[in-house]
Amino acid sequence: MKLVKASMGILFAASLLIACGGKDKKEDKSPVGKLEGAWEIKRAEGINSLQNVGASYEFKGNKLTCRQQGFIIPGTTFITDSTFAFQIDGQEGKSMYKYHFNGDTLLVVPPNNVGQVFHMVKK
């Protein structure tokens, strides 16, 4: 009987460990987690669309760094489910961007939109 109880205890403990340790990496579904990492504009629509292709946005927590045409622009960001604000370091004003996902593509509408849409993919 002791052997049966010990076996049951070991089996229960093993089942519990397997169930709890299924994935090594949790997928972050928060707005910050969805944008985390570097994104590159692969296609752009609207005014001056060609000059934006190739630019990248790198999100790290509440930091955002834009890289475009040799310029590196660091700043802070505040992210919601559908927007992110960008405040360049050392400046007071913030720019508010709208975003959503189409599959793995991040679609971003810049502030003061004049028909611009950035189609971004994760680098």
Image: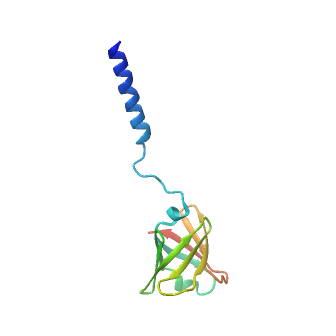
Q: Using the image, determine if residue 74 lies above or below residue 16.
A: below
Q: Indicate whether 123 appears above or below 72.
A: above
Q: Residue at x 43, y 40 (%)?
A: 20
Task: Give the quadrant of the N terminus.
Answer: top left
Which quarter of the figure has residue 78? bottom right
Residue 60 in picture, x, y percent from top left: 44, 69
Q: Nearer the viewer, residue 74 or 89?
A: 89
Out of 25 and 77, give the one closest to the viewer. 77
Q: Kindly give the residue lying farthest to the right in the view shown.
A: 114
| Residue lying farthest to the top in this orientation | 1
| Picture coordinates of residue 108, whole percent (x, y) | 59, 73
Residue visible at 55% across and 76% down? 43
Number of marks in the rendered image? 0
Depth order, front residue of 105/62: 62
Residue drawn at x 41%, y 32% is 15
Residue 74 screen position, x and y as percent: 45, 81
